[in-house]
Image (cartoon, rainbow, N blue to C red):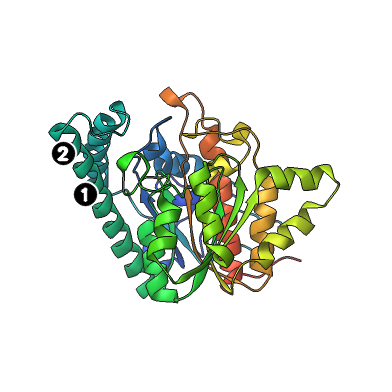
Amino acid sequence: MLDFDPGSAPEKDAGIFGLPHKEKDAALVLLPVPWEATVSYGGGTAKGPAAILRASGQIDLFDGSVHRPYEPGIFMRAESKEVRAWNKAAKAAAQKVLRAGGRGENGGSFKKSLRTANDLGGRLNDWVYRETKSLMSAGKIAGVVGGDHSVPYGAFRAAAETHGKFGLLHFDAHSDTRDAYEGFLWSHASIMRNAMRDLPQITRITQVGIRDYCEEEHEFTRALGERARVFRDADLAKGRFAGRSWTATAQDIVDTLPDKVWITFDIDALDPHLCPNTGTPVPGGLQFAEAAHLIELAARSGRTIIGFDLDEVAPAPGGRGEWDANVAMRLLYKLAAWTMVSRGLRKTRA
């Protein structure tokens, strides 16, 4: 770092955010997961990690709130060719299921395709688990960069084994609590149901920005009782309409969190003008500054951010602009910065 100038243009061979770190030197290691096997509407999220990496060199590393958040080291691994191959095979199988409407009237061929997609989804979960568990065991902070929102399940497992009890701060337009949506055990629409069902170490899920969900999901989160708090987008908007400050609302959200928190962020939690190419955009949502402020309050509260994931970023088709990736890489930097603060690795400027 002695020869690194954070105000200069990034070197040709620089890593994420134009940084010179290697994995061994980095406190935070980002794991890209190019996966979108079960997407049923818009696609492209498998290209999200690479798009974020390409756009990230455009960021100014100076942060007005966190003192040199990059200094503890941020490194993004290369994408796994094996995961890319699994994704290709799983997506091909899943498309056969989706064309049948997720129903098994087509007999043996349908069942074989569904089994293939589910088996590969389970293999992906195990891979993410092993990779993130290895990072945590080495004393690294792990961040997952998707891919669709099914990808961090294995990281939740690793966090549960490494950190014990924790909560999920879940930013999303969707509840993601459907039961094996369209027959897919590891659907991006089912990850939070799977996590809350399988991982008792997750003592609380706090969902923020939810605005597109079904009755099944509504009943599931209600049945979780004290393990779930849902801050619907409609209710957040009503607070704004009544003149309530976002700081007050955000503090209410933070107050629901336990001492240790994993932040799981689906980019479609934001207003769609910030992520127009995400797979399932929904009108409404948070502004960038609102999301960043909530993450900041969580870090300043004394809670520990044990890790995070950022998912559902899809670049514009045909390379027609990098807006989605531009927004996403800036959000990723905020997640990194405030995670460093919460872990005692960085100081705030005020």
Q: Which residue is mark 1?
A: 119
- Which mark is first along the chain, 1 or 2? 2
The answer to which of 192 and 280 lies nearer the viewer is 192
The residue positioned farthest toward the right in the image shown: 243
- Within-10-Å neighbours for mark 1: few <14, some 14–19, many 20+: some
- The image position of residue 63, as x and y in percent, is 66, 56
In the rendered view, does 166 fall on the left or right side of 120?
Answer: right
- Residue at (69% x, 42% y) in the render: 234
In the rendered view, does 91 fall on the left or right side of 43?
Answer: left
The answer to which of 321 and 13 lies nearer the viewer is 321
- Within-10-Å neighbours for mark 2: few <14, some 14–19, many 20+: some
Regarding residue 143, the answer to whether it shows in the image is yes
The answer to which of 194 and 3 lies nearer the viewer is 194
Nearer the observer: mark 2 or 1; the answer is: 2
- Residue at (48% x, 23% y) in the render: 320
Q: Secondary structure at mark 1?
A: helix
The residue positioned farthest toward the left in the image shown: 108
Amino acid type of disc 2?
Answer: Lys
Identify the image quadrant of residue 226.
bottom right
Q: Secondary structure at mark 2?
A: helix
Identify the image quadrant of residue 135.
bottom left
Q: Which label number is shown at residue 112?
A: 2
Identify the image quadrant of residue 53.
top left
37 over 69 or under it: above or below: above
Amino acid type of disc 1?
Answer: Asp
Image quadrant in which the C terminus is located: bottom right
- The image position of residue 33, as x and y in percent, is 35, 49
- Residue at (34% x, 38% y) in the render: 182
- The image position of residue 324, as x and y in percent, is 53, 35
In the rendered view, does 210 fall on the left or right side of 15?
Answer: right
